Amino acid sequence: MEVLNLGILAHVDAGKTSLTERLLYAAGVIDVVGSVDDGSTQTDSLALERQRGITIKTAVATFAIDELRVNLIDTPGHPDFIAEVERALGVLDGAVLVISAVEGVQAQTRVLMRTLQRLCIPTLIFVNKLDRAGALYEGVLRQIAQKLTSRIVPMGEAADLGTAAAAFKPIVQDDVLLDVLTEHDDDLLQRYVDGAPLALHDVLAQQTRRALVHPVYFGSAITGAGTDALTDGIRDLLPRARSTGGPLDGTVFKVERGPAGEKIAMYGSSTVRRPFATASGTATATARSRPCRRTATATRATASAPGRSANSGACPTSGSATRSPTPTTRQQPDTSRRGSPHRPWRPWSRRAARPTRATCASRSPSSPSRTR
C-alpha cells in the first residue's frame, strides 16, 4: 500500500479541524461530521480544546483514498503552540495550507508558508469558508500571489459566494496552467512552440511534488463544497511512497499519556523527502538510540508513517515494555565535551558538614573567608 504523510496547517480559526472532520467523513472513517463549537471533533480530545474551540496539541488520524493510505496530522493554528507544528514538519510528505475566504492571508499564514517553502514540502492551498458572508475569490487569489507566492494554479472557479449554496467547479484553464508551468520547464515551452501534445496534468503533478507550484482549491469544510476536488488533488498531485515492511526507521515527534497513564509515542518520517526503510504499526521493541535519564540503553519508537507506540515506561526498552525502576541516585552528567562552560555536577552527600545557625552568626559579613 502507498503511504502519504499529510499535514493540515493554517492560521487560527481558518478551519483546519473542520476540514479534517470533512475529509474523515468523506473517506467513511466517521459517520457524522463533528463540530468544533460543540466539541465533538475527533482530533480535539483535550477538555480545554473542546471548551475553547481551538487546537492545542497535534493529533493524528488515518484514512484511505482508494489504495492510498493518508496519515493526516492536524496541527494547532495559534502561534503560542507553534512548537507542536515544528515537530510535525519533519515527518510530512505534503501539506494542505488552509486560508479563510473572509479573513484572507493572516500573519501566521505567511510564517507557515515561508517554512513550507524553506523545507521544500509540497503544498496544496485550500481556501475555506466560501459559505460565509464576505467571502472573496479574486481578492484572496491576489493576496496569495502578493503575500505568499506567485506560483499558484487556481484549480477551478467559485460560485454563489457567501451563501449556503456556495460551490466550487474544478475547471482548470489550460492557458493559465501553461503560463505557470512553463516558468520552470523549458522543454514544455519548446513542445508548446513546436505544436507537440502536452500532458499538462502530468507536468502539474511533477512540479507540485517538487514544491515548484501550488494548486489552489476553494470550498467549505462545513457544507462539503470543494472537498471532493481537494481529495482528488491529495491523491493525484502530492508525493507518495510504497511501504516495504522493513525495519522501523523514523523520528518520534510527539509523546503523550494514554487513558491508563501509559506513554504513547507518535512516530513517523517523511516517506518521500528522504529514503529509508518503511514500516507501520505499533512498536514495543524498538531500535537503540541515545541514553535517557532513567535507563542506560534508551530507545525511540520509529516508523515510516505516523503511528502510535504504547509503552508504560519512561523510555521503551529493547524486547520489553515494562516500567524502568526509579534510580536511587542521580547520574552525573557527561562533562567531557571540550570547552563546556558548566562545572562537573556532584551529588550532595549527607556526610558533608552542613552550616548551622551558630556558625552563620559567628561569621562576619565582611570576612574574606566567607563561602559562596
Image (spheres, rainbow, N blue to C red):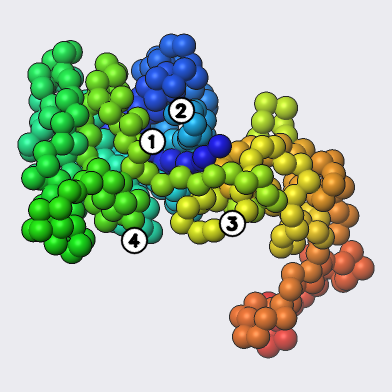
Element type at marker 1?
Answer: helix
What is the crowding at mark 4: few (fewer than 14 residues within 10 Å), some, or many (at least 20)?
A: few
Q: Is disc 3 in contact with disc 1, using a CB cutoff of under 8 Å? A: no
* Tag shown at residue 235: 1
Q: Where residue 319 sits in the image (x, y, percent)?
A: 85, 47
Left/right placement of residue 3 relative to residue 23 reads: right
Camera-near label (4 vs 3) is: 3
Q: Is disc 4 in contact with disc 3, using a CB cutoff of under 8 Å? A: no
Front residue of 24 and 85: 24
Q: Is disc 1 in contact with disc 2, using a CB cutoff of under 8 Å? A: yes
Residue at mark 2: 66
| Location of residue 289 (image quadrant) | bottom right
Q: Where residue 250 sits in the image (x, y, percent)?
A: 61, 53
What is the crowding at mark 3: few (fewer than 14 residues within 10 Å), some, or many (at least 20)?
A: some
Camera-near label (2 vs 3) is: 2
Question: Quick one: label 3 or label 1, which is nearer the N terminus?
Answer: 1
Quarter of the image that includes the N terminus: top right
Residue at mark 4: 118
Residue 50 visible (yes or no) = no
Q: How far apart are marks 1 and 4 (CA)?
A: 23 Å
Question: Quick one: label 4 or label 3, which is nearer the N terminus?
Answer: 4
Residue at mark 3: 276
